[in-house]
Image (cartoon, helix red, strand yellow):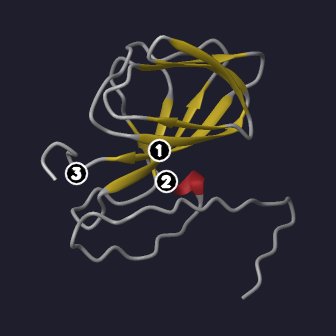
Amino acid sequence: AQLSSIGGCGLLIYERVYSLKGTPVFQHGVLDDSPLIPVPGETFVLRKLLPQTSEYDFNIHIMDFQPGEYLFVKEIHYNQHGLLMLEGKGIYRLAENWYPVQAGDAVWMAPFVVQWYAALGTTPTRYVILKDTTVDPLLS
């Protein structure tokens, strides 16, 4: 098979050990066709790229921030995350450390670590994030 694109393209592969006994199927589509997910109290735009069913023990999200937008809360939870900055730049807080990030950077967030993000600069920020969703590591 051959892939082609008039405007260019990229391929991102997340490799991980699957934890559940479901039978996930290959998913594909166009980002703009993915529904926007309401995030009450937040300003960013969220799209979930995988079905929210028990066949998947993780999800892949696209998060979009306009310049100056930020997470309204510092998060801490059992989910581990991995993200890739696709566009823009910002600052990521992990525990008590602050990391400047920009398009092309990857970030791993361990479970139970305080995390927070703010979009900096004059252009929008977009990142893709993999997030454990249905498996609690303390119960597995």
The amino acid type of the residue labelled 3 equals Val
What label does residue 135 carry, if any? 3
Residue 101 figure quarter: top right
Badge 3 marks a residue whose secondary structure is loop
Q: How many marks?
A: 3
Mark in the foreground, 1 or 3: 3
Please state, as top left, top right, bottom left or bottom right, where the N terminus lies in the image: bottom right
Q: What residue is at 76 percent from the left and 24 percent from the top?
A: 123
| Sequence order check, earlier mark of 1 and 2 | 2
Looking at the image, is mark 1 or mark 3 earlier in the sequence? 1
Left or right of 133 on screen, residue 36: right
Asked whether, in this view, residue 2 is left or right of residue 130, the answer is right
Looking at this view, is 131 or 8 the one in front?
131
Alpha carbon of mark 1 to alpha carbon of mark 2: how far?
6 Å
Q: Measured along the vertical axis of the image, is residue 23 above or below residue 55?
A: below
Viewer-nearest of discs 3 and 2: 3
In this rendered view, identify the residue nearer to me: 136 or 52. 136
Q: Secondary structure at mark 1?
A: strand
Residue 12 bears which disc, if any?
A: none
Mark 1 and mark 2 residues within 8 Å of each other at the beta carbon? yes
How far separated are the C-alphas under marks 3 and 2?
24 Å
Amino acid type for the residue under numbered disc 2: Ser
Expressed as whole percent of the image width and height from the top left, the position of residue 98 reads 58, 14
Picture residue at 29% right of the left edge, 47% below the top: 133
Q: Residue at x 39, y 19 (%)?
A: 114
Residue 34 bears which disc, if any? 2
Q: Which residue is mark 1?
A: 47
Quarter-of-image position of residue 87: top right
Query: x and y percent of residue 60 in the render?
Result: 45, 51
Q: Is residue 47 above or below residue 92?
A: below
* Kind of residue indicated by mark 1: Arg
Task: Using residue 79 as the reference point, say whether residue 120 is left or right of it.
Answer: right
